Image (spheres, coloured by chain):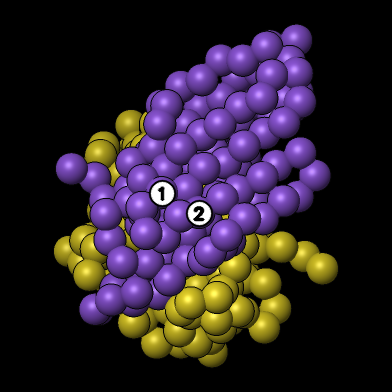
Amino acid sequence: KNEVEQSPQNLTAQEGEFITINCSYSVGISALHWLQQHPGGGIVSLFMLSSGKKKHGRLIATINIQEKHSSLHITASHPRDSAVYICAVRTNYGGSQGNLIFGKGTKLSVKP
Amino acid sequence: EAGVVQSPRYKIIEKKQPVAFWCNPISGHNTLYWYRQNLGQGPELLIRYENEEAVDDSQLPKDRFSAERLKGVDSTLKIQPAELGDSAVYLCASSLRGKDTGELFFGEGSRLTVL
């Protein structure tokens, strides 16, 4: 079982829809990152959070430390939101402290 | 301010040839990471530097991969000799702090194709 699991793997939405991407993890963490990767492009950091909720424009990220779960929400989705969204956790233990464990990503396609 | 700069963006080589990738992190960032990303997968750590010291290279295939970060600024990742399975995108990232609170900044990646 992967230490970081994302769902769904693929998501197709119509423009304007509310989108939720989920991330569950099984390790102790000090922070969780949501990242965005466009085809052929580099990775952009969207959020880094260790508790509660953060909002930036149409993007909202939440984390529940007790349940080891985080969600990324996109309101009023737009075709330019089409990308791969990656969840990554920063471990808080052992020799890998400070390293990130990445999920496999959720490929989002927003149709006009 | 310039972001993380990587070169080359694309490289096509034949197997058994050597290849090198270069990364210039954001100015002042003491932590530098090299990741490998295969198609449809998340990035996998190859090596992490704190300044010029490699603090985690446990996932680096040391028989053919090597990396250096002289003077604790830019870094090179080398593969010699390359194998077909090395085809991937090699990502460099940097952060200001190595542990709890460092936001990550990624380069555009170097896409390697081994024929």
Amino acid type of the residue that numbered disc 1 sits on in the rendered structure: His
Residue B1 or A68: which is nearer the viewer?
Answer: A68
Q: What colour is chain B?
A: yellow
Amino acid type of the residue that numbered disc 2 sits on in the rendered structure: Ile
Chain coloured purple in this rendering: A
Image coords of residue B56 (percent x, y) = 31, 76
SS assignment at label 2: strand
Q: Are marks 2 and 1 in contact (CB under 8 Å)?
A: yes
Image coords of residue B46 (percent x, y) = 33, 62
Instruction: Judge whether B56 appears above or below A88 on screen.
Output: below
Residue B104 or A5: which is nearer the viewer?
Answer: A5
- Binning the other alpha carbons within 10 Å of mark 2 as few (below 14), some (14 to 19) or many (20 upward) gives many
Residue A39 visible in the displayed image: no
**Tag 1 residue:** A69
Identity of the residue drawn at 51% across and 34% down = A21
**Tag 2 residue:** A63
Residue A44 or A48: which is nearer the viewer?
Answer: A48
Q: Given the image, what chain letter belongs to the residue carrying mark 2?
A: A
